[in-house]
Image (spheres, rainbow, N blue to C red):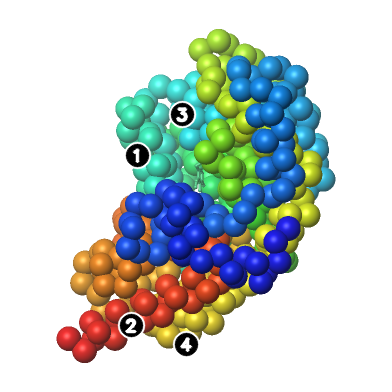
Amino acid sequence: MSTAEELDAIGVDRLRAAGSLKWSVFPDAIGAFVAEMDFPLAPAVADAVKGAVDRGLTGYLPSAVRERMSEAAARWQRDRYGWDVTADQIRPVPDVLTALRATIDFFTAPGSKIVLPTPAYMPFLTIPAMHDREIVEVPMLVKDGRHVYDLDGIDRALADGGGLLILCNPYNPLGRVFERAELEAVAEVVERHGARVFSDEIHAPLVFAPHRHVPYASISPATAAHTITAASASKAWNLPGLKAALVILTNDADVQTWARPEVAWAEHGTANLGVVATTAAFDEGREWLAGTLDYLDGNRRLLGELLAEHIPAMGYRAPEGTYIAWLDARDLGIDGSPADFFREHAGVAMTDGIACGAAGEGFLRFILATPRPIIEQAVRQMAAALREHAAG
Ligand SMILES: Cc1ncc(COP(=O)(O)O)c(C=O)c1O
């Protein structure tokens, strides 16, 4: 594990030279728009991938390799969240979005609507249309400064033809980590309508104390019965390009449905290197993750301090989980897209909240899994752009 000083020392030039998506799309701007980490891979993960390459494990996915990932994922769920799922309930997929697409196609009633709390991770707003499904956006409410589900809104949407509720916990982009009671309240509404839930838990390893991740399907026999869970090591260990994620099936009917060839086809494309990396991450990457979470914890606090000092009108509440900051730019006096403004005038590339649904208008998504000096540079450049804008 790198020390904080070593992570701090990773500069923009080095990241730009490495050429990740985040650092190559906008060559003149600080990349803060895509959920990638700017830190070196966990050594255990890097060794596992190199070992697989050295062994020539670059063909199709052998079942023994696949099973080891399911076993490691089951151990992870048990050790980390106290959730007893067995390896045979855990299937491989190349990525979480493939799991969502299979869920829509094979686990919901044809033509039923997709109910989506917003602001939402951007592809959740575009994928349903690819499956000829209508989305019902249900904006989150703010209670005591914290985002909470609009249970009445979800109830109405499910009553009005909704068949699947997409939950994202920890929540990209809002950073919430939902408490058991909040999930129980959602479950009650879902049960009332006999609906299904797709629970995207890709950010589950990235939770800051005292918050704790509660797997939605783990809370009751009812949630186990109505949920398809998606899990992955790809956010916490920065592996999305290696193509491996997991679907957790928590009832016999879903296990049987998944076994149908046209459904299990969703597994196709899961890559050996991703499977090997994910196995190593869950089994041997825990200490690295603890160190990374410490660093990220510092980042989310630092961002708050910097904004309070340099851009006090920017709204920010430190995320409880994820490395995504949701910034409220509505009081900054910017006309039009705040993301365009900061990319053009501050050289900081963020996602415009509007891409997360109508509820995101006036907000920004800033990825804080980057060295602290880069966060500081980004805030300073944004503050300078605002000063110039105010001066006219
Ligand atoms: C909530 C959420 N779900 C899914 C994804 C995409 O995951 P995958 O690459 O496994 O499809 C992301 C990526 O940032 C995400 O934040």
Q: Earlier in the sequence, mark 3 or mark 4?
A: 3
Residue 16: % across, % down:
44, 57
Which amino acid type corresponds to the residue marked 4 in the rendered image?
Glu
Which amino acid type corresponds to the residue marked 2 in the rendered image?
Ala
Which amino acid type corresponds to the residue marked 3 in the rendered image?
Arg
Compared to residue 285, the image places residue 314 above or below, namely below
Residue 58: % across, % down:
61, 22
Which amino acid type corresponds to the residue marked 1 in the rendered image?
Thr
Residue for point 49% across, 30% down: 98
C-alpha separation, residue under disc 3 versus residue under disc 1: 11 Å
Foreground label between 1 and 4: 4
Mark 2 element type? helix
Residue with the mark numbered 3: 101
Residue with the mark numbered 1: 126
Q: Is residue 112 left or right of residue 107?
A: left
C-alpha separation, residue under disc 2 versus residue under disc 1: 35 Å
Question: How many badges with numbers are in the image?
Answer: 4
